[in-house]
Image (cartoon, rainbow, N blue to C red):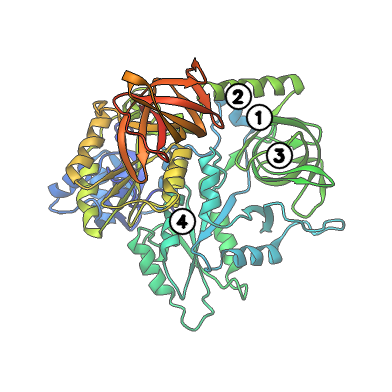
Amino acid sequence: MNKNAKPNESPGGAPDTSPAPTKQRSVEIPHSIGVRQLAELLGVSAIDIIKQLMKNGIMANINQVIDYEAAATVASALGYTSSLTPRVERASAQAAGETKRRPQFEEKELKGLQHRPPVVTVMGHVNHGKTRLLDAIRQTNVMDSEAGGITQHIGAYQVNVSKQKITFLDTPGHEAFTAMRAHGAQITDIAILVVAADDGVMPQTLEAIDHARAAGVPIVVAINKIDKPNADPEQVKKQLADVGLVIEEWGGDTVCVPISAKEKKGIAELLENLLVVAEVEDLKADPSRPAEGVVIEAELDRSKGTLATVLVQNGTLKVGDTVVIGSIWGRVRAMFGDTGKPLKKVEPSTPVAILGLSSVPQAGDILTTVANERLAQALIAKRNLAMERGSSVRTRAVSLVNLYNQISAGGIKELNVILKTDVQGSIAPIRSSLERLATEEVQVRLIRIATGNVTESDVMLASASKGLIIGFGVSSEPGVKRLAETEGIDVRYYDVIYNLVDDIEKALKGMLEPTYVEVIEGHAEVKAIFATGKAGKVAGVYVNEGKATRGVAVKVRRGEEVVHESVVSSMRRFKDDVKEVAAGLECGVGVEGFDKFEVGDILEFFHREKAG
């Protein structure tokens, strides 16, 4: 079983950051493989693969699938020996590759590493059976049903399969998965993609695939509802192949298991396959270290106090440990497993509910174990200082304006792009144009390509992947602008392909002129108009939100129309000149070059600042 790396999603071919292959380096190739995937596997550009194929009389494009013999010939020309065993080599290459989603260990720490259970998230389209599948797994395989263990919902649970554990996050859906990633928490090792056999691949199925690929996690497909009379698993497999998920029996590397969550058929086979994928992933952690983990959910329990569900990712968490989560700290007073049983210690990949925090943390916050309260408070102070200095989501996000600086600083090796277009025909020319912009320093990676308006799901994917959104001939759905501002996501809209490509190219070279956005400081309503001799007229206004400031830019709005735009030339409160007036107060305002005020006009005070 080959790890499902990133099929059909790296438009520039494989990154050219890998060293040139040494002679006789071994590589394992499946029966058939796409040109793009072969480039990724060999660590060269797709252009190099196409050139080698042309030398052998094979005309192929970047998306074409070639057989083993052709791929082996190319590999040999590039200094590799090859064999027809598709499982291990690509998996290990990806595990050491671009997506560093697991804890990275120092050489001295490798001695303490042990295999850990995989953490699995279930994704798929609404009503395709995600929750029912989780229920079926839990009912038939839940661990530890000893006395005193009243099952309670703690957001995750473990099952026992062939004397091995698997941890399931009981938060089905890619929205929760991506929200965690947007907060910097990468906790999933494997994604189960549930597709209904009677319904096939649907819009949210495609979204789930995009999110899993962007996270770099392998996908195991569960074709559900095979018990239904109109079930058509073969059609589902074809639809999956069309979007780049080629199942193993068709020569691909995606594990696919037919199931019926309702009748509990195929559940055992699905779990066994998860263990196979986990074995290839070679998941490890060091139980001897102080614990690190991620908050899955948290609440304020009236009788117990703050109750936080934590997934321990590395190290061992013990009762009595001092922990820091975000900007709060506490001492672990008690821990409970998913059956409600009290626990004294918890090892990696285990979900646990903990008591003892000073307040309620947010889902996605990182748990760190420290030696004592003094160190806990010092760590919190350091984090607060970083926040004050602007180390926020907004400043970490990639935009076209700050792209070159981040590339130069070595901060990014890939520009993750979500492309939304008006029609399908616009995709190919834009995609090919963006592919040609890849350089040795940075790859342009299209993590989602679709038609339709920009959605909140697009923004969350961009936030989780530290990418940007390009809309061509489209607009945005309600709520997108506000969410993009909150998450610090750069959303660009174009109607001409040349302008789109030109902006991206300039950004990659550091030549893009910055854009400016208007930041509204406040609004005031004109209640009266006063003559002031030669100075003309000033407006007596009531500041109804924000603040009014002398010297800032101002727009005079009359209904939907802006009748004038300039700056605030004067501001008086009673007889005094003032610089600023807060909401809820009245003042007199003079606007440079304008005195034709009308009662009911709205003065909008604003300033401009660089976007991104």
Pointer 2: residues within 10 angstroms few (<14), some, or many (20+)?
some
Circle 4 residues within 10 Å: few <14, some 14–19, many ≥20: many
Question: Which comes sooner in the sequence, label 3 or label 4?
Answer: 4
- Give neighbour class at mark 1: few <14, some 14-19, many 20+ (Cα, 10 Å): some
Where residue 95 appears, as percent x and y from the top left, is 46, 41
Q: Which residue is denoted by mark 3 in the rendering? A: 360
Tell me the residue that label 4 is attached to: 208
First of labels 3, 1 by sequence position: 1
Q: Whole-Å distance between the Cαs marked 1 and 2?
A: 7 Å
> Is residue 19 visible to the viewer in this orientation of the structure?
no
First reached walking from the N terminus: tag 1 or tag 2: 1
**Which is more toward the observer, 545 or 305?**
545
Kindly state the secondary structure of the residue where label 2 is placed. helix
Residue placed furthest toward the top:
576
Q: Point out residue 221 in the picture as x, y percentages from the top left corner.
A: 48, 62
Q: Amino acid at mark 2?
A: Arg
Tag 3 or tag 2, which sits nearer the N-term? 3
Considering every residue shown, the one lying at the far right of the view is 147
Q: Which residue is mark 1?
A: 327
Image marks 1 and 2: residues in contact by CB distance under 8 Å: yes
Q: Mark 4 vs mark 1: which is more N-terminal?
A: 4
Residue type highlighted by circle 1: Ser
Image point (71%, 41%), residue name: 347
Q: Circles 4 and 1: CB distance less than 8 Å?
A: no
What's the CA distance linking mark 2 and mark 4? 33 Å
Per the image, the residue denoted by label 2 is 383
Marks 3 and 1, how far apart at CA = 10 Å
598 or 104: nearer the viewer: 598
Q: Nearer the viewer, mark 2 or mark 4?
A: 2
